[in-house]
Amino acid sequence: MLIIPAIDILNGSTVRLYMGDYDSVEVYDTNPVDMARKFEEAGAKRLHIVDLNAARTGSHDNRMVIRKIRRSFSGTIEVGGGIRTREDVEHLIEIGVDRMVLGTVLVKDPKLVSEWISQFGPRFIGGIDALRGEVKIHGWEEGSSLSDIVLAKKCKELGLVSIIYTNISRDGTLEGPDVERTARIAEESGLPVILSGGISSEGDIAAISEGLYPGIKGVITGKAIYKNKIDLAACIAKYQRAQDSEGILW
């Protein structure tokens, strides 16, 4: 199991939202580039970045910050938020981003996603963000009337390499992850799934690492790190084996 620290960027700053609410923003003192360096020093092999401005409005204002993070972090970088055009994809590839997380475009234009996979190869992850089973889009501010299970199966059909699944009601709450639904997404899709949202303690990571949910290949954690609920370096040393980060295709 891979432990993936998260950096959410809003207006160039490191932030966390509560249940995806832009009106409930907590800003942290450490800038995103310094945070990325700290995560690598802790042993992180993969970094999850969310461009909240792009997710909400399509703004590219944080792209320079992402470029600086790329220069500072040697491992795999995945970026989500506002990736909706071919130009977005090409720019992020030029920056050096390894994986792109697709959410809104995946729901609204799956044919375009298929075209990107054909042109740019296996570098796209399905970002499924759901509230009570309904997929949310446009920075979680709009409903889609689409089931998370249906979209998970669609990800497999389109050829995405994996899925990041977030139960929005758990995100940023420190109330524990929705392991059962995440495991269901993995089972229904047949794809590797990364759990996101709700990690509150080392115990959450330990429970997932026991292997009872083989479809869950990684966990994303953000607020628990920033609030000192978990020691990232200790968790990586204890629960992440060296081979977890080798030859990753997802």
Image (cartoon, rainbow, N blue to C red):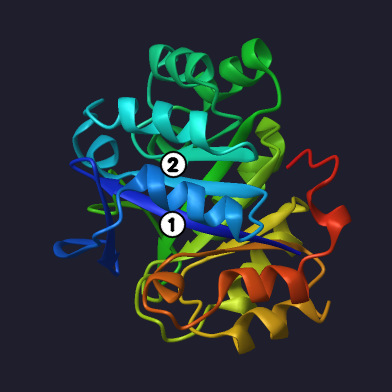
Q: Which residue is mark 1?
A: 129
- Which of the image's four quarters has the C terminus? top right
**Between residues 138 and 51, which one lies in front from this camera angle?**
51
Q: Is residue 137 left or right of residue 113?
A: left
Q: Which residue is mark 2?
A: 103
**Between residues 191 and 83, which one lies in front from this camera angle?**
83
Can residue 126 be seen here? The reply is yes
Can residue 102 be seen here? The reply is no
Quadrant of the rendered image containing residue 145 = bottom left
Three-letter amino acid code at the position of disc 2: Gly
x then y, percent, for residue 16: 29, 63
x then y, percent, for residue 97: 54, 28
Q: Circle 2 sits in a helix, a strand or a loop, which is it? A: loop
203 in relation to 141, above or below: below
Which one is earlier in the sequence, the residue at label 2 or at label 1? 2
Quadrant of the rendered image containing residue 162 = top right
- Which of the image's four quarters has the N terminus? bottom right
**Between residues 225 and 110, which one lies in front from this camera angle?**
225
Residue at 63 percent across and 36 percent down: it is 74
Quadrant of the rendered image containing residue 104 = top left
CB contact under 8 Å: marks 2 and 1: yes
Residue at 22 percent across and 28 percent down: it is 61
Residue at the farthest left position: 23
Q: Residues within 10 Å of mark 1 (few under 14, many from 20)?
A: many
Q: Circle 1 sits in a helix, a strand or a loop, which is it? A: strand
x then y, percent, for residue 136: 35, 54
Residue at 28 percent across and 32 percent down: it is 62
Q: Is residue 130 left or right of residue 193?
A: left
CA gap between label 2 and label 1 equals 8 Å
x then y, percent, for residue 27: 20, 61
179 in relation to 101, above or below: below
